[in-house]
Image (spheres, rainbow, N blue to C red):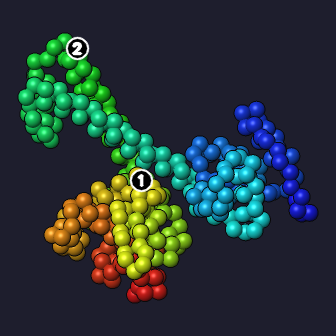
Amino acid sequence: MASGETNNQKLVHASGDAEKFYRRLTVPVRVGIEATGNCQWFLELLGKLGHEVWVGDAAKIRACDPRQQKHDPRDARLLLQLLVENRFPRIWTPSSEEKDLRQLLLHRYKLVRMRVQVKNELQHLAMNKGITKGRRLWSAAGEKVLCELPLAPWASRRREDLLRLRSMLNEQIAGLDQAVEKVAEQNDRARLLMTQPGVGPITSMAFVLTMGDVSRFPRGKQVASYLGLIPREYSSGGHQRLGSISKQGNRFMRMLLVEAAQCVVRYDAGFRNEYLHRCHTKPRGVAKVAAARKLAVRLYWMLRTNTAYPEIARVGSSSRVPLGGAS
C-alpha cells in the first residue's frame, strides 16, 4: 500500500482464491515470485489480468536472508522487502512462444533417451546369447542376427515388443527432427549459428531459446558461468583451488554443447588443434568440456555481433573480452 501498511492473507490456489484476490485489484500491480516449476498457470493468470510478474532467482533470494529459518510467511515478507527496496533478483523469462518451442526440443530429448534405453535392453538380450557387436548390432546384418537369436518364449516376446517400441520411437523422433529443422530455418538467429560447422538445428535452436537476449551478458565469461561450464573455485590465501565444473544452469543445453563440440572439432581446424593439444595434458573429458565452453562463447559472440562463420573465427572470440574489444 502507499501508506506502507501490509497484511498477510493465505491464498488456496485449488479453490480459486488466487484468481479472486488478483481480480479484485483495481490497478495493475507488480508481483514477485521465486523461480519454481509448474507455475505457468499463475504467470498466465496474472498476465491475463494485466499484472506485472517478476520471477526471482531462488538462490539469490535465499542468500538475502541470513537467518537459518525458512517458512512460507517469512519467505513472503522477504520477497516483499526485496521488491520495496528495489533489490529483487529478477531473472529473464522466455515468451510463451519460446516456452512452447522449448517443449518441442525437450519432448524430442525425452524420446531419444527412451530410445537409448530400449536399445540398451536389446543389447543385453544379445550379450546374454554371446553376441557382442556394440554399435554394429544396429546394422542390417546385426539386426538380422538379433532377430534370429534363439530365445525362450517370454524373452522372445520381450525382443518383439522392444523392436516394435524402437520402430515407433524412430518414427516419432524423425517427425520431431523435421519440425525442429523447419523452425530453425525460419529463425534468423538459429540460421546464423548454423553457419558454424558442426552446429545443427537442434543445438542452434536450443541455444537461442536458452540464452534469449544475449545483450544481458556483458562478455562470454558470464555466458560460460550461466551454463555451468566454469570450474568450482575454492581459493584462499593466495592458493587457487579449482574443482569440477559448477553444472549450474540448463543441463539440457550443457549436454547439447558437449555433444556439438565433439562434432565441431572434426570440421573446425582451430577447435581441433586446441582440443588435441589439451588432450595431451588433460583427461579427454576435461578437453570435451573445455571445447563446449569455447563453443558456447563463440555462439554468444556470433549472436552478439551478428557475425557468421568464418568471419567470427578470424576475428576470434575470447570469454574475457568485452563487446568493445571485438573488431
Q: Position of residue 187 (x, y in %)?
A: 45, 60
Quarter of the image with the N terminus in it: bottom right
Q: Residues within 10 Å of mark 1 (few under 14, many from 20)?
A: few
- What residue sits 81% from the left and 57% below the top? 28
Question: Which residue is the site of mark 2?
Answer: 154
Q: Residues within 10 Å of mark 2 (few under 14, many from 20)?
A: few
Does residue 19 appear in the picture of this structure?
A: no
In which quadrant of the rendered view does residue 158 lie? top left
Q: Position of residue 137 (x, y in %)?
A: 13, 36
In the displayed orientation, state which residue is furthest to the front: 237
Q: Position of residue 26 (x, y in %)?
A: 88, 52
User: What element does badge 2 sit on?
Assistant: helix
Q: Nearer the viewer, residue 103 or 172?
A: 103
Earlier in the chain: of badge 1 and badge 2, it is 2
In the displayed orientation, state which residue is furthest to the top: 153
Indicate left or right for 156 with 309 as reference: left
In the displayed orientation, state which residue is furthest to the right: 3
Q: Nearer the viewer, residue 308 or 157?
A: 157
User: What element does badge 1 sit on?
Assistant: helix
CB of mark 1 within 8 Å of CB of mark 2?
A: no
Alpha carbon of mark 1 to alpha carbon of mark 2: how far?
38 Å
Indicate left or right for 313 with 214 as reference: left
Question: Which residue is the site of mark 1?
Answer: 251
Vertical placement of residue 38 versus 320, above or below: above
- The amino acid type of the residue labelled 1 equals Arg
Indicate left or right for 182 with 50 as reference: left
